[in-house]
Amino acid sequence: MIHEELQKLEKLAHQAGQRLQLLSEENAQLKQKLAEVSATLEEKEQEIDHFKNKIKISNIVDNRPVNPEDSAEMSDLINNYIQEIDQLITYLSE
């Protein structure tokens, strides 16, 4: 009787171990998928920001009225680009 109970417990422990292994593998796969989706989402958000900047630049070029907040943001962005270009020129000049 005790032997049968031990066998049942061993069987249950083995099944639990197998289930734990399957769940661990599934968890690893889901984490990998989440990382891929997060990377894709970040990439898409950057593309959207880039596209928004293109629209703002287009509006400025076409002399359309631009939201003052957008104008200040674009001015900062252009200044940052100019600073980066200056740094690159300095680096390449060396």
Image: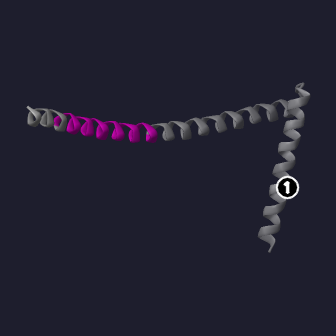
* Apparent side of residue 36 relative to residue 8 in the rendered image (left or right): right
Residue on which disc 1 sits:
83
Quarter of the figure with the N terminus: top left
Q: Against 47, is 80 above or below?
A: below
Which x, y percent locates residue 51? 70, 34
Q: Residue at x 34, y 41 (%)?
A: 25
* Closer-to-camera residue (10/63): 10
- Which residues lie in the magenta part? 11-32
Whether 24 is drawn above or below 83: the answer is: above
Asked whether residue 16 is drawn in magenta, I would say yes
Position of the C terminus by quadrant: bottom right
Direction front: furthest residue: 2
Horizontal side, residue 44 vs residue 82: left or right: left
The residue lying toward the viewer, choosing from 92 and 37, is 37
Q: Where is residue 68 in the image (x, y as percent from the top left)?
A: 91, 29
Image x and y of residue 58, in percent: 80, 33
Q: Is the magenta stretch mostly helix, strand or loop?
A: helix
User: SS of the residue at dot 1?
Assistant: helix
Residue at image coords 88%, 41%: 75
- In the rendered view, does 25 fall on the left or right side of 60? left
| Between 10 and 21, the one nearer to me in the picture | 10
- Taking the spot 85% from the left edge, 53% from the top edge, the residue there is 82
